[in-house]
Structures are given as C-alpha cells and as structure tokens.
Image (cartoon, grey):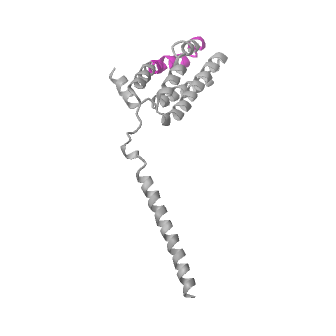
Amino acid sequence: MVLSLVSQLRANLQRVAVLCLSLCLCFGLAACDGSQGRKAPTISDTDLAVIQRQAEGFLAARDRLPDLAALVNDRNWVFTRNLIHGPMQEVGRQMLYINQRLLPADRAEATERADNLKAALAQLDEAARLQDGERLRKAYIQVARDFGLYAQVLPPQVQDALKQA
C-alpha cells in the first residue's frame, strides 16, 4: 500500500514538473519572439513619392467634381460623359498604383474603395448615356462620396504634403 502511494505521488510530481517546464518554455518563447526591437511597418520614401505623384492626379480629378455637378444639374449628357472619359479617365489607374504602394494591411480597404469609385463612375456614365436625369443625380452623389472615401486612404504624409502644395 505504501509502495502504491509512493508511485502515485511520484507520477503526479512528474506531471507537475512537465507542466511547469511547458509553461516556462511557452512564456520564454513568447518573450523572445523579437518583436520588441521591430519598428512598425512604414512606407518607403520611394513608395511615398509614387503615391504622392499619383495622388496629385487623383485629387486633380476630384477637384473637377464641381464642374461635374454643374453638368449633372444641367443634364448635359454629352459633356458629363466627356468629363468622365477625359480628365477623370485616369482615376482608376492612379488608384491602382497608389494601392500597390500602400502598406499590406491597408491594401484591401483601399482596393474596395477604389472599386466602389470606379463602379460609381461607370453608373454615372451609363446614366448620362441613357439620359436618365434621376439616375444621373443619384450616381453623381455616389461618385462624390466615393472620391471622399478613397482620399481618406492616402497616407497622412501625402495628405499633408498635398495640402501644403
């Protein structure tokens, strides 16, 4: 009987020792993962320069929104489409280049906002082609909204630099 108690005690002590060793290893490995010396991810100067150059074109197109609003209000179908296919035509390409240079964590949201803006521009173009005034008005509101939403994904450094320019 004493022998069985001693062997059970020994087995239980071994389990406790293994558990303590496992916990020490887990906490030790977590403490030594190397993240303490890492800097937060940042956009390189080269990428910032590309983003800024493309953002200038994007914001120039956004600055044409009052002109587009006037055309929509006048129901000027031809010049609405001309503005979309002229000065605003490069917006999709500019957003693509910007999205490629953003931090990986920001790309999915930027891509979604870019897709929404391109879809809104296509809806605006289609409404002008069909000469549908109500649909044109609603599509313009969506375009203006999506321009503003996409501008928010631009890095703060780029937004500050463009405000000072």
Query: Front-most of 4 and 101?
Result: 4
Q: Residue furthest right?
A: 130
So how many labels did they put on this image?
0
Picture quarter with the C terminus? top left
Residue 77 pos. (x, y %): 60, 14
- Residue pictured at 38% horizontal, 31% vertical: 156
| Relative image position of residue 56 (x, y in whole percent) | 43, 19
Q: Which residue occupies the foreground of this view, 36 or 41? A: 36
Q: Is residue 77 above or below residue 48?
A: above
Q: Is residue 78 left or right of residue 53?
A: right
Residue sitting at x 51%, y 24%:
95
Left or right: 48, with 65 as reference point: left
Position in image of residue 31 (x %, y %): 41, 53
Residue 73, by quadrant, is top right
Dividing the picture into quadrants, the one containing residue 158 is top left
Outermost residue on the left side: it is 164
Q: Is residue 18 above or below residue 6?
A: above
Residue 119, by quadrant, is: top right
Residue 87: image x %, image y %? 51, 13
Let me know if residue 69 is in the magenta part.
yes
Residue positioned 65% across, 17% down in the render:
131
The region drawn magenta spans 57-79
Is residue 21 highlighted in magenta?
no
* Main SS category, magenta section: helix
Work out whether residue 40 or residue 12 is closer to the camera in this orientation and state it: 12
56 horizontally vs 132: left or right: left
